[in-house]
Amino acid sequence: MLKRKNFQFVLCLATASLFGVQVRAQSQSNDSLKQAVSELNKTVEVLKRIKITGWIQAQYQWAEEKGAANLDGGDFASNSDQRFMIRRGRVKFTYTQKLSQFVFQLNGTERGVNLVEIFGKVTDPWTKSISLTAGVMNRPFGFEIEQSSSVRESPERSRYSQILMPNERDLGAKITFEPSVDKKFYGLKIDAGFYNGQGIAVPGTNSSIASTGAFVNDGVNEFDGFKDFIGRLSYYRNSKDERYRYGIGLSHYNGGIVNRSNILYELDGNSYVAADTTSQTFKGKSASRKYVGTELFFSVKSILGKTTLRGEYIFGIQPGVDNSSRSASALPAKKAAYLRDFNGSYAYLIQRLGQTKHELVLKYEWYDPNDKLSSSELSSNNFGIGPADVKYTALGMGYNYYYDANLLFMFCYNMVTNESTNINGYTKNLGDNVFTIRMQYKF
């Protein structure tokens, strides 16, 4: 009888031990599961802060003449008047927290891979209206520079934008004041920053400059100690019923490029002459680069569809070399600097056809790199006068079809006209009209 009781006691003890082991194992299993779920939630929270976007612009182009020099994607090869190309292939990564943001964007085409932008942004925790941005970013000048190429209604930015601020972006830092929708001054935006000045290089976009020998090489490395100031004041708002949108803006660029010699050419009459060096030294000093830009925007929704009018006007002083007024993206190979007074503009008329997916676009633009001389005064017989002083106008006519939220088909014929001058090779209009058919996929 005693043995039987002992056996029952041992059996109960063993059962209790096994149950305890099972409870501890289950508890450990639950802890591991909770830890795994916690880690998963942390990963999900991080992933939720990351946004990946991108677009590809595949296009076919036909030029009026073989080897046409143009700013609709770069010069054609000398024996070609037709081409397929990937104009842009972008991938953009944006990591956003409550008061900070990191952006990294790459561009990949058949011409190579290049950095588009990389910057960090932090917003103040008190007003949430003031932010600091540092890195490679869009220059805060005007509307067109900062407008994404994925939503622009025409294939390319205007001529003056591409010449004065090539590839749109530069390395620097800026402060922005931009109240949120619940603040009193919502719609107002003020940008002010300092930048290296030479911008960044994109493979295959500087072909019309490479042949002139204007620059030693392309890159984002600073080549002088001067910093350029860029500021923009803008105000954009919608009406209460969202039927109207209107905007106005003013921009200023104040900088320069280093003079590598003591020769600085300025216009005097119909020719360039060297500035007086008896009273001042130019070598090592800054050749003035100053722009003033204005912008206007208006759109209205009606039974005809959405109608948009948009335009900008810019004027100022541009330092260049004898055969190029383009802003230097690297140290100029030619040491003598030329100062030119210029002006430029563009205007859009954009009409969405009712509630359809069809859109008509009309764009007119000009860039006059030397607005002090008329076409009849531009002559190769006058010292320093050449192709860099020739005025261009362009009329672009386009049709866009928005297949869905991701896919866009664009058709545009850009008719480019240069003024007839007495400069060799520019006595008549060049054959540089370009027709573009583009398919854009955006995600």
Image: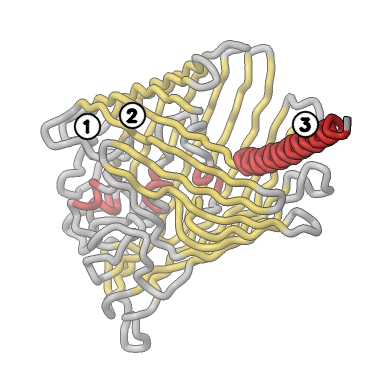
- How far is the residue under mark 2 from the one under mark 1? 9 Å
Seen at 69% across and 46% down, the residue is 235
N-terminal of the two: label 2 or label 1? 2
Left or right: 308 with respect to 217? right
Above or below — where is 319 with respect to 419?
A: below
Give, as a three-letter code, the residue at label 1.
Gly
- Residue 437, by quadrant, is top left
Mark 2 highlights which residue? 415
- How crowded pointer 2 is (Cα within 10 Å; few <14, some 14-19, many 20+) is rated as some
Give, as a three-letter code, the residue at label 2.
Met
Seen at 48% across and 33% down, the residue is 150
Residue 436 lies, in percent from the top left, at: 33, 25
Q: Do the residues labelled 2 and 1 touch (CB within 8 Å)?
A: no
- How crowded pointer 1 is (Cα within 10 Å; few <14, some 14-19, many 20+) is rated as some
- How far is the residue under mark 2 from the one under mark 3? 36 Å
Question: In the image, which disc is placed on residue 431?
Answer: 1
Left or right: 308 with respect to 321? right
In front: label 2 or label 3: 3
Above or below — where is 20 with respect to 336?
A: above
Q: Are marks 3 and 1 in contact (CB under 8 Å)?
A: no
Question: In the image, which disc is placed on residue 239?
Answer: 3
Seen at 27% across and 44% down, the residue is 204
N-terminal of the two: label 3 or label 1? 3
N-terminal of the two: label 2 or label 3? 3
Question: In the image, which disc is placed on residue 373?
Answer: none
In front: label 3 or label 1: 3
Element carrying mark 3: loop
Residue 243 lies, in percent from the top left, at: 74, 24
